[in-house]
Image (cartoon, rainbow, N blue to C red):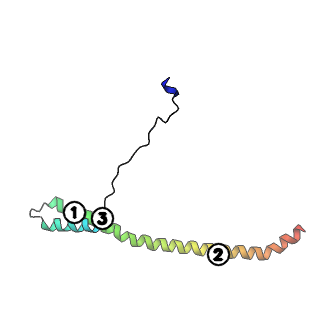
């Protein structure tokens, strides 16, 4: 009759994740210093590091584009909302008296 227990059979999961501080600038500086302080130069490793750095620079450059396009999108949305409010007010002012008169 073990299946008729009324108590809590399942225990909550516990996560013991310890957050760590990550300094991206410090990591990048260490990576650059390591690259320049290497005594043996492996062309494939240097090429990989250059490619990796190029991708990171492109992603940083796109951040500016993203914020610029977001501002433009927000402006367009604001102008559209203002236009719809003005159109709604104009319609209400013009046609509301006619609608009220037709209901009476």
Q: Front-most of 58 and 3?
A: 3
Mark 3 or mark 2: whose residue is earlier in sequence: 3
Please provide percent x and percent y for residue 64.
40, 73
Please provide percent x and percent y for residue 56.
30, 65
Specify the label residue 55 is tagged with.
3
- What residue is shown at x 11% (from left), y 62% (from top)? 41
Q: Is residue 62 left or right of residue 4?
A: left
The residue identified by callout 2 is 83
Residue at the outermost top position: 1
Q: Front-most of 20 and 92?
A: 20
Discs 3, 2 touching: Cβ within 8 Å: no
Mark 3 or mark 1: whose residue is earlier in sequence: 1
Q: Is residue 28 left or right of residue 40?
A: right
- What residue is shown at x 61% (from left), y 73% (from top)? 80
Please provide percent x and percent y for residue 17.
35, 51
- What residue is shown at x 85% (from left), y 70% (from top)? 100
Total number of numbered labels? Answer: 3
Q: Secondary structure at mark 1?
A: helix
Q: Front-most of 24 and 46?
A: 24
Q: Secondary structure at mark 2?
A: helix
Discs 1, 2 touching: Cβ within 8 Å: no
Marks 3 and 2, how far apart at CA: 42 Å
- What residue is shown at x 52% (from left), y 71% (from top)? 73
Dot 2: few (<14), some (14–19), or many (≥20) neighbours within 10 Å? few
Please provide percent x and percent y for residue 82.
63, 75
Q: Is residue 6 above or below residue 50?
A: above
Specify the label residue 49 is tagged with.
1
Specify the label residue 82 is tagged with.
none
Mark 1 or mark 2: whose residue is earlier in sequence: 1
Residue at the outermost front position: 7
């Amino acid at each position: 009759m073990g299946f008729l227990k009324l108590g809590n059979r399942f225990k909550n999961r516990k996560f013991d994740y310890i957050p760590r501080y990550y300094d991206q600038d410090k990591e990048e500086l260490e990576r650059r210093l390591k690259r320049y302080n290497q005594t043996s130069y492996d062309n494939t490793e240097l090429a990989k590091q250059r490619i990796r750095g190029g991708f990171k620079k492109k992603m940083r450059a796109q951040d500016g584009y993203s914020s610029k396009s977001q501002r433009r999108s927000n402006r367009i949305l604001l102008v559209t909302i203002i236009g719809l409010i003005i159109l709604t007010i104009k319609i209400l002012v013009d046609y509301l008296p006619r609608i009220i008169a037709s209901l009476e």
